[in-house]
Structures are given as structure tokens and as C-alpha cells.
Image (cartoon, rainbow, N blue to C red):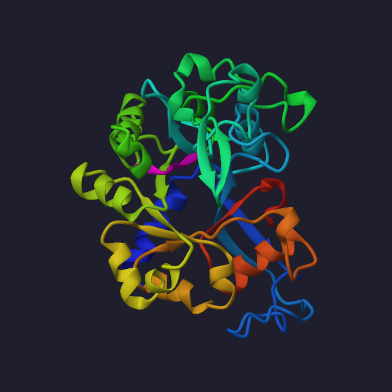
Amino acid sequence: MSRQFMELRGKLRAGSPVMTALVVGVLVVGAGCSDGGGNWGGALQEEAAEEVSALLVAHRGASAYAPEHTLAAYELAIDQGADYVEPDLQITRDGVLIALHDLTLNRTTDVELVFPDRFRVDTVRGEPVQRWYANDFDLEEILRLDAGAWFGEEFAGARVPLFSEVIDVVRGRAGIFAETKAPEVYGDRGFDMERLVLVELSQHGLDRPGADPDTPIVIQSFSAASLRILRDELGTELPLTYLISGPDAEDWLSAEGLIRVRAFATGIAPTKSLLVNRPEVVARAHDAGLTVIPWTFGASRADQFDSLREEMARFLVDLGVDGLITNNPDLFPR
């Protein structure tokens, strides 16, 4: 394991106010270890207890139990022991950062009822589809939307939060793992998402590593170009994580690809399936000085495992990843 990687992992862990200690006794795997070909079968064997510290990142908040990207989801994630919450960022028409996963509002709000005529028509597989893009609405309009009722009546009235509100709620209680979402789309519309993110963090005094040890900041993106802008053009020294999936994943996860990643990021976040058949990627990334935090772990997705807790323990103990991104913070193995 490289000295560069060990220093980086230490910084991430030292900055976390509630760093989870994963204590695994009977969950330490013997015959159940991966053979490198994706075979995760076999009974768990009882071995001596082993302690592994790892980051718990709450995916869109505690999104298994509360509507994603609402203050309720972030609050619950912190109550369930999250080290970091993970807000996806979009931009309103008047240039305000909001926490929202999709480019559009229609999946997680009642925008179709409040603004029935404010859609664009896209063509998908030859068929017209109506979409209400967040960037077509001013902040004042978005704040009129219900972002909770779709998930459950008890959340009716929840709003789409501003990034600044997320910071205020989380600050001093957990870190923030913010994602620049579709930055190229916003660039085509005249917005500089990367600069907006750093300006917002600066206004809260969080634009430098260690500025608030109780609120560490990591910025992640599926866009290598976005991370390069943050690192090279805007000069941020904050930890940056490259999200990896899709057809280019094999190239990025090669030894040469990881060296290229290290030029603009401090960590990778591959989809968990990429590591099942490629467990060697974790050590390879560590040798390149990169942390590894796979996604997304959810109770409804624990394929090949008896429980989500078992699945997460396997990744943490067998593969040695540095943390996990999960919808179920309360099921993180402790």
C-alpha cells in the first residue's frame, strides 16, 4: 500500500466526526472469500474479531427510509451514524444550487400538478416524452413543489433543499460528499457548476481541506472533465472522487487508467459490480494513491448475500474498500 494512499486515507478518516469502527467477528469470511472470479458463495466461518475503520456515506441521505435529497433524509442519515451525506447538485434557472438527483423534477416532486404546462417534449426511442427540467424553473418556483409526498404521506410538504441548506443542516455533525451532476449539460446552458460549488463552499468557509474538521468535504463526479476543472483550472485542494461505471470502466480501472485518475482525483467510486469480478482493483487503486468507495448498497439489492449487512461486510473486510455508499446507513456493519 503506497505511502501517498495511507496519508490520504488518514486525512479522510481524521476529518470525519463520527468515523465508524467496523468490528467484525463471525462476519470475517473464510470459505466465503471471493476467488477473483466473482464467486462469493460459501458459509461464513467464525474467526477472530477484526477491526476495520471505514467511511459510511449516506446515498441521497437515508434514502431507503425518507424521500431522497430532502432535509428529512439527511437528518435521518446523521441519526443513523453516517460519516458523510451525499447530495447530488443541480442548478435552477436563476443560478442556485439545489440538491436533486435527476435533471428533471417530475420523478420526485408534484411539478406536473403545480406547473402542468411547463414541460419540454423529448423524443425517447421514437416516442415523445414530457419532461420538467429543474433548470427551466427559478428557485422560487421550485420551492413551491412538494418533494416528499411521492415517498409517503408523512413526508408531504418536504421541499427541494438548497445546497446551502444542506450545509447548514449537516455542518458539525457529518461530512458532505457532494456530486457535480451533469456539469456538461449546465455548461451548455451557460452555467459554471464547478465554480458555483466552490463559491458556495467558500461562503460557508469550507472550500479548503480541514477548514472545519467536523464537516469534511469531498466532491465527486462522473465527469473527469469536471474534476479536472476543479483541480487544474480552479485550483481546489479538496479531495475529489471519480465515479466510475459504464463502457469506459475497464480502461479507467486498469493500472494505467488509475494513474491517469490520480492526476485529477484522490479517490474512485466504482459501481460495486465492477469490483465483484475484479477484486484486485482495490489494491491497484491503493497502490496508485487512491481511496476506493463503491456504490450503491441497498437492502433491495443485496444479490448473492443473505443480507445487506453481510454484503457490506464482505466488501469492507474481504476487498478492503475504504468505505461504502448506501441507502441504508442503519445497516452498516458495526
Q: Is residue 155 above or below residue 304?
A: above
Residue 226 part of the magenta segment: no
Where residue 72 sits, quadrant-wise, is top right
Residue 104 at x, y percent in the picture = 53, 34
- Residue positioned most to the front: 126
Q: Which residues are magenta?
A: 175-183
Going 66% across and 41% down the picture, which residue do you hit? 63
Residue 178 part of the magenta segment: yes
Where residue 169 sits, quadrant-wise, is top right
Say whether residue 1 is visible.
Answer: no
Residue 260 at x, y percent in the picture = 28, 67
Left or right: 329 with respect to 176? Answer: right
Going 30% across and 63% down the picture, which residue do you hit? 262
Residue 26 at x, y percent in the picture = 76, 70
Q: Nearer the viewer, residue 79 or 126?
A: 126
Residue 278 at x, y percent in the picture = 52, 77
Left or right: 46 with respect to 281? Answer: right
Q: Is residue 210 above or below residue 27?
A: above
Q: Is residue 87 above or below residue 332?
A: above
* Total numbered labels: 0
Q: Quadrant of the N terminus?
A: bottom left
Please tell me whether the stretch drawn in magenta is mainly helix, strand or loop. strand
Q: Quadrant of the C terminus?
A: bottom right
Say whether residue 56 is visible.
Answer: yes
